[in-house]
Image (cartoon, grey):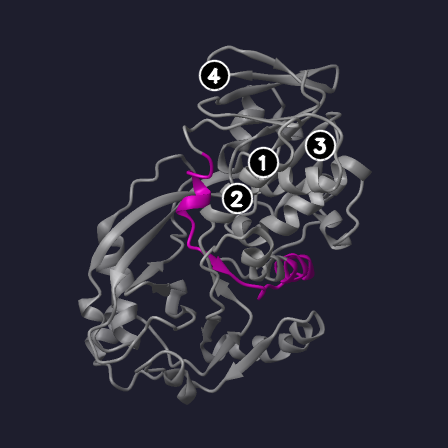
Amino acid sequence: MHDIIVVGGGIIGGAALYNLLQNGYKGKVLVLERNNALAQESTSLCAGGMRNIWSTEVNMKMTCYSIEHYKNFRENFGVSIGFKQNGYLFTYYEENWQNILDFKPKWDEAGVNVELIPPEDIANIVPYFRPGVNHLKDDILNMVPVSPIVGGLLGKDCAIFNATTPAQTYFDFSKDKYPEKIEIKLNKEVEKIIIDNGKVKGVITRDGEKIPAGAVLLTAGAWSRQILDNSNVPDDLSIPVVPIKRVLYVISSPINEKDYSKIPLTIIDNGVYFRPEGDNLVAGRADEKQAPGFNTEPVRSYYEDFMNLYLQVRIPGSEYCRIQNMWGGLYAVNTEDHNALIGEHPDFENLFICTGFSGHGAMEAPAAGLSIAEIIENGEVRTIPEVGLLNIQRIRDRKLIKETIVL
């Protein structure tokens, strides 16, 4: 019998496995992944951004840790993950700018390396960027309601990277170093977790196989709540995590003589963001009207008739930013406070949960994997103590840790 089953072969499961074994876990681990390859769901479909600019201390601590981990990934694992510290650039209207000025000392105190950028200097970072609106005609302003951008916040340590590579590396490294401790099964979808008298006994797969285990670590992202529902966990004992579609568009760069290959991931009006992707850009925006569900079909018109208009407002030549490719993936959204759920379930012994990252799972995976490994081994978080605040019990106690900087 396996000592623990890891449900889900994405970057969170991989980071947890790696840290668990590196920290000296003595038991045997079984990883179950429903696809025919690891890290092919939300991990491979994410935007590939890495930032430490947040409104909550725990997210700042986790992502600062993760940035250092990813920055040294090639040296430590011998594998390139395409980690490039191009930065993150948030832009703001007048009504929000004072909040940024007031909050900056908290970022400074937390060691988040940020710089305030005057509007006239943004074009030095993003070529031809137009912060004002005087160049726009009234009919355009009526169609695309925008205001002058009065400042930018540049996160200098923020980066872009390929999340699939570290995820796969965690599994490969663990398998090679600890072959006697780990087994990975692909095409094995977990239908439900076996819970008897408040204690985990194993799992049952979609094909009906019953696999006993002493503990289960649920790292199934957007599918986590569904698995708990199938396990007959009552609503009041479950987790507030729902699947929400997010679509990314690979678009050609603006047609002007400037190079956009080294710009930061830039967030402009109405939450539209874009970053370099080779000679192209990747663009996205969270659709606040998107209902929960597992449909990931991308919608071309959402970019062409909506997002691209904001690009045209800010950068000349953006009307030629045509779609080259597009795809949809799923956020595991914690509807209560948009922060992860990390810890042992308060009602079910040996059911460990690490999910609900609400879009920042790949960014926080190194810190999250370390933290849940420490909880499994030691019963508490030691390296980044603030992560202990992300326990499941906080939802019931209404001690929410609300993250407001979510894309």
Q: Earlier in the sequence, mark 3 or mark 1?
A: 1
Query: Which of the two marks, 1 or 4, is nearer to us in this view?
Result: 1
**Closer-to-camera residue (69/371):** 69
Name which of mark 3 and mark 4 comes first in the sequence. Answer: 4
Query: Which residue is denoted by mark 2 in the rendering?
Result: 169
Q: Earlier in the sequence, mark 1 or mark 4?
A: 1
| Disc 4 target residue | 206
Local SS, label 1: helix
For disc 1, the marked residue is 176
Residue at the spot 63% in from the left edge and 55% down from the top edge? 402
Give SS at disc 3: loop
Q: Which mark is residue 345?
A: 3
Bounds of the magenta segment: 38-65
| Residue type (three-letter) at the residue carrying disc 2 | Thr
Find the distance from the CA under tag 1 to the CA under tag 4: 28 Å
Q: x and y percent of residue 317 in the render?
A: 20, 75
Question: Sequence-wise, which precedes: disc 2 or disc 3?
Answer: 2
- Report if the CB atoms under discs 2 and 3 are less than 8 Å apart: no
Q: Is residue 11 above or below residue 196?
A: below
Q: Is residue 197 left or right of residue 294?
A: right
Q: What type is the residue that disc 1 sits on? A: Asp
Please report whichever mark, 2 or 1, sits nearer to the chain's N-terminal start: 2
Q: Of the residues shown, which amino acid type is indicated by label 4?
A: Arg
At 52% from the left edge and 17% from the top edge, which residue is drawn? Answer: 205
Marks 4 and 2, how far apart at CA: 27 Å
- Label 3 environment density (alpha carbons within 10 Å; few <14, some 14–19, many ≥20): some
Quadrant of the image for the N terminus? top right
